[in-house]
Image (cartoon, rainbow, N blue to C red):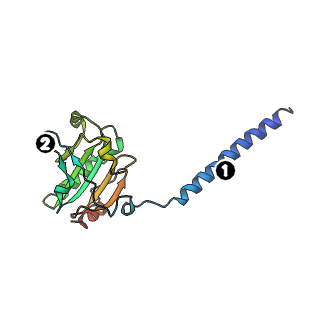
Amino acid sequence: MANEIPKRSSQRDVILGLLALGLVLSGIGLLVPYRSPENGPLVGQPVPPLAFRAPGQAPRSVSELRGKTVLIVFWAYWCEPCLAEMESLQALEQQMEGQPFVLWMVHVGQGESIARGIPFLPKNLLFGNTPEELEAFRFNGLPHTVLVDQEGIIRAEYEGPRNWASPEAVATIKRYL
């Protein structure tokens, strides 16, 4: 019986310690400012000089798209959140038809054969970039999306999936047409 008291005390101390640690960590999270799409690390800067490779085509550069608003989506075929936003990206591309807008979907891995397995093939499906080339965009997860205005300036960065066909998303893109 005497041995049970310290044991209970130890368990209680561990639980209290874990709760305190959780509070400290959540407090640290509260100190980190919310990162809205308009204050990402690249917002306001020129889009990094990067050549994208489309299957069977010569490398293309974002700089050749001056005069058009460009939505660059970094994704991977194994990324479920990436695949979840495909339908809305397809709807966005259809909504923006005939406007100075380009959707580029950049697969972050190697291998063009994966295109057969995805539900939506955009007009500009790009592959073959090295990790060093992609590093300039400083993303930490997928999908990662960058909105570039007609002058080649990054106007917003988005982490995670979005409904790109929503009125809010379309209005944001149209603001830079």
Tell us which disc is closer to us: 2 or 1: 2
Point out residue 60 in the picture as x, y percentages from the top left corner: 17, 49
Point out residue 8 in the picture as x, y percentages from the top left corner: 77, 38
Total marks shown come to 2
Which image quadrant is residue 100 in? bottom left
Quadrant position of the C terminus in the picture: bottom left
| Most distant residue in the right direction | 2
> Looking at the image, is 63 positioned above or below residue 129?
below
Which amino acid does the dot numbered 2 rest on?
Gln
At x 74%, y 42%, the residue is: 12
Quickly name the residue at label 1: 20
Q: Residues within 10 Å of mark 2 (few under 14, many from 20)?
A: few
At x 27%, y 62%, the residue is: 153
Gap between marks 2 and 1 measured at Cα:
57 Å
Which image quadrant is residue 41 in? bottom left
Point out residue 26 in the picture as x, y percentages from the top left corner: 58, 54
Which amino acid does the dot numbered 1 rest on?
Ala
40 or 99: which is nearer to us?
40
> Looking at the image, is 18 positioned above or below residue 26?
above
> Looking at the image, is 69 positioned above or below residue 9?
below
Instruction: Decide if residue 65 is on the left or right side of residue 86.
Output: left
Asked whether the beta carbons under mark 2 and mark 1 sit within 8 Å of each other, the answer is: no
Which label belongs to residue 57? 2
Quadrant position of the N terminus in the picture: top right
At x 19%, y 43%, the residue is: 53
